[in-house]
Image (tube, helix red, strand yellow):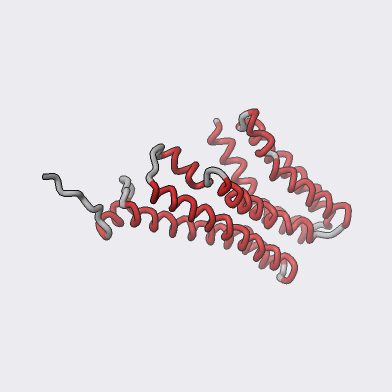
Amino acid sequence: MKVVLNLISALFIAASPFVLYWTLTNHDVAVAAITLIAWVIVRTIPILLSAKKEQRRAALQLPAIALVFALLGWLLDDGMWLLVLPSATQATFGLTFLRSLRTTPLIEHFARMVKADLGAREQAHCRRWTKVWGIYLIVLAALGLVLAGVASLKVWTIYVGILSYVLVGMLFAVEYVVRKISFRDYGRNPLDWLLGKLFPAVRSDVS
């Protein structure tokens, strides 16, 4: 059930730029803002249902940001506030990565879900890539913000709704390959099999 709710929430996030494009193209800012507010409320339902009690405050952070920008756009009759929302969301994720460097880096937290005991090199890798992810997401958010101000609505929608996800996927792929080559810890999937053939794990001789 939790997986289904998370999937629904992710689909709402992915679809929101196209909802904004359609409403701003075919209607006025008020209609677009009201649609976005309703969109955010519906998207928040699976978050509340799937999040633990102690996690709800953090889980509601992004919906709260969305509601603020939607209300500003409605009250000021300026669609620019609505277009800022995806960049604000992406920047929030980036800052979450960077803030985690004060304690346990976010990527290390995820890594320990798979492998509880991490070596010093693995911890350094997690810290380094947590910083990379934080900066990368903020740069992508800044680019989206620039496009919201200077580009057409169509160009902005293509970037925010498609290209930014491609760029995130590319960095994920780069980190994955770098991690596998660095630590030679391969799984059973086809990519790991190929990397294992190209960069075989070093075996210690047993005397």
Q: From the viewer's perspective, is residue 136 above or below residue 126?
A: below
Instruction: Name the quadrant containing residue 179.
Output: bottom left
Q: Is residue 64 left or right of residue 8?
A: right
Q: Residue 174: image x %, image y %? A: 44, 59
Instruction: Name the quadrant containing residue 200.
Output: bottom left
Q: In this view, does 99 lie to the left or right of 186?
A: right
Q: Which residue occupies the extreme bottom position in the image?
A: 150
Q: Which residue occupies the extreme top position in the image?
A: 53
Instruction: Name the quadrant containing residue 82.
Output: bottom right
Residue depicted at 63% across the width and 33% down the height: 55
Q: Is residue 73 left or right of residue 141?
A: right
- Which quadrant would the N terminus be assigned to in this image? top right
Task: Give the camera-side residue of 28 and 80.
Answer: 80
Residue depicted at 27% across the width and 58% down the height: 199
Q: Residue 207: image x %, image y %? A: 11, 45
Q: Residue 34: image x %, image y %? A: 81, 47
Count of marks overlaid on the render: 0
Task: Give the camera-side residue of 91 and 50.
Answer: 91
Residue depicted at 68% across the width and 64% down the height: 156
Residue depicted at 57% across the width and 62% down the height: 163
Task: Give the camera-side residue of 119 and 80.
Answer: 119
Q: Residue 28: image x %, image y %? A: 83, 57
Q: Which residue occupies the extreme left position in the image?
A: 207
